Image (cartoon, rainbow, N blue to C red):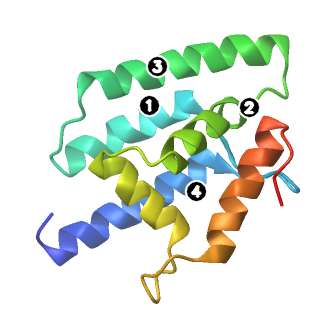
């Protein structure tokens, strides 16, 4: 996406999709996301910007949607994001050497104004991990 107008249009489309897909319940540490709706939104955005998603992305999203539906049938309060977040955050904080993980950690833990590590943001990540994994945080 080299053209600024195309990039801005994609950002706007993604922001609209996020506003439809993410729900921030009061007092919740993480947003709720409907994976069944995610598949539809991504499928609508992709052709408009002429990009293709790898088959595994849609397969994984569909699988998550199915699992989420089954779990919510048994427990309406089930949150797949809350279930996988501790694992994902642990993986990111473990210092995985992949460039994508490194960029993700940088995005989550640095101050965008200075580009330096934000102790506040890093502490927030550790606190979230401790709360969601139900393990005490070391002082």
User: Are the residues flagged by discs 4 and 1 in contact, CB closer than 8 Å?
Assistant: no
- Residue 103 is situated, as x and y percent measured from the top left of the image, at 36, 59
| Pointer 1 residue | 39
| Pointer 3 residue | 62
- Residue 23 is situated, as x and y percent measured from the top left of the image, at 70, 49
> Could you tell me how far apart the alpha carbons at marks 3 and 1 are, in whole angstroms?
7 Å
Q: Quick one: SS at disc 3?
A: helix
The residue lying toward the viewer, choosing from 5 and 111, is: 111
User: Are the residues flagged by discs 3 and 1 in contact, CB closer than 8 Å?
Assistant: yes
| Pointer 2 residue | 79
| Pointer 4 residue | 19
Number of marks present in the image shown: 4
Q: Residue furthest left?
A: 2
User: Are the residues flagged by discs 4 and 3 in contact, CB closer than 8 Å?
Assistant: no
Circle number at residue 93: none
| For marks 3 and 2 on the same chain, the one whose residue lies earlier in the sequence | 3
Count residues near mark 2 (Cα–Cα under 10 Å), then give few for <14, some for 14-19, many for 20+. some
Quadrant placement of the C terminus: bottom right
> Could you tell me how far apart the alpha carbons at marks 4 and 1 are, in whole angstroms?
15 Å
- Residue 87 is situated, as x and y percent measured from the top left of the image, at 60, 34
Of tags 1 and 2, the one toward the viewer is 2
Of tags 3 and 2, the one toward the viewer is 2
126 is higher (above) or lower (below) than 37: below
Which picture quadrant has residue 4? bottom left
| For marks 4 and 3 on the same chain, the one whose residue lies earlier in the sequence | 4
91 is higher (above) or lower (below) than 103: above
């Amino acid at each position: 996406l080299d053209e600024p107008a195309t990039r801005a249009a994609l950002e706007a489309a993604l922001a609209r999709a996020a506003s439809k897909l993410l729900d921030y319940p009061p007092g919740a540490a993480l947003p709720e996301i409907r994976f069944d709706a995610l598949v539809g939104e991504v499928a609508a955005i992709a052709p408009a910007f002429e990009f293709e998603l790898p088959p595994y992305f849609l397969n994984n999203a569909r699988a998550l949607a199915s699992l989420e539906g089954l779990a919510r049938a048994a427990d309406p309060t089930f949150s797949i994001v809350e279930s996988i977040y501790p694992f994902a955050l642990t993986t990111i904080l473990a210092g995985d050497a992949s460039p994508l993980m490194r960029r993700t950690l940088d995005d989550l833990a640095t101050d965008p104004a200075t580009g330096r590590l934000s102790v506040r943001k890093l502490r927030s990540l550790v606190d979230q991990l401790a709360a969601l994994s139900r393990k005490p945080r070391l002082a």
